[in-house]
């Protein structure tokens, strides 16, 4: 059996994310929890959850690890 590694594709640039979505993504990529992110941004945990759901939908990702990888590749 042969394994082939392919580059993950990031189709959506940071420009498609709203500034607050970018900020939330930056916090999550830095390892903060939803609650820590909410407190730092002055939002409710629910609002941070909504932002991250939108990010997942826009970037077509399903895990926090994928979001983190994209945040790093975008320089956030």
Image (tube, grey):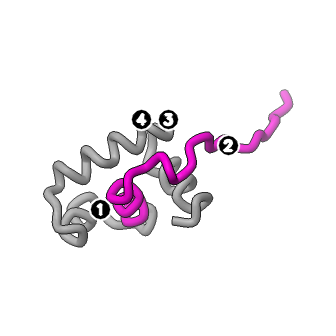
Q: Position of residue 38 (x, y in %)?
A: 21, 63
Who's the residue at 50% across and 56% down the image? Answer: 68
* Label 1, label 2: how far apart the Cα atoms are: 25 Å
**Spatial separation of the CA atoms under disc 2 and disc 4:** 17 Å
Dot in front, 2 or 4: 4
Whether pointer 1 and pointer 2 mark residues with C-beta atoms closer than 8 Å, the reply is no
What residue is at 16 percent from the left and 61 percent from the top? 43
Residue 33 position (above or below residue 18) = below
Quarter-wise, where is residue 39 in the image?
Answer: bottom left
Residue that protrudes farthest toward the bottom in the picture: 40
Of callouts 1 and 3, which one flags the residue occurring earlier in the amino acid sequence? 1
Task: Write down the residue under mark 1.
Answer: 33
**Measured Cα–Cα span from mark 4 to mark 3:** 5 Å
Q: Are marks 4 and 3 in contact (CB under 8 Å)?
A: yes
Q: Under tag 3, what secondary structure?
A: loop
Q: Which mark is residue 44?
A: none
Question: Which residue is found at the position 30% from the left and 48% from the top?
Answer: 51
Numbered disc 4: secondary structure: helix
On screen, residue 39 versus residue 32, left or right, reads: left
Q: Which labelled disc corresponds to residue 60?
A: 3
Q: Find the magenta span and give its range.
A: 1-28
- The residue tagged 2 is 8
Residue 56 spot, x, y in % from top left: 42, 40
């Amino acid at each position: 059996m042969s394994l082939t590694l392919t580059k993950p594709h990031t189709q959506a640039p940071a420009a498609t994310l709203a500034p607050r979505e970018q900020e939330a993504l930056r916090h999550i990529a830095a390892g903060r929890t939803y609650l820590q992110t909410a407190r730092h941004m002055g939002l409710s945990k629910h609002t941070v959850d909504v932002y991250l759901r939108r990010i997942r939908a826009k970037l077509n990702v399903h895990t926090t690890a994928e979001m983190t990888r994209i945040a790093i590749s975008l320089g956030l």
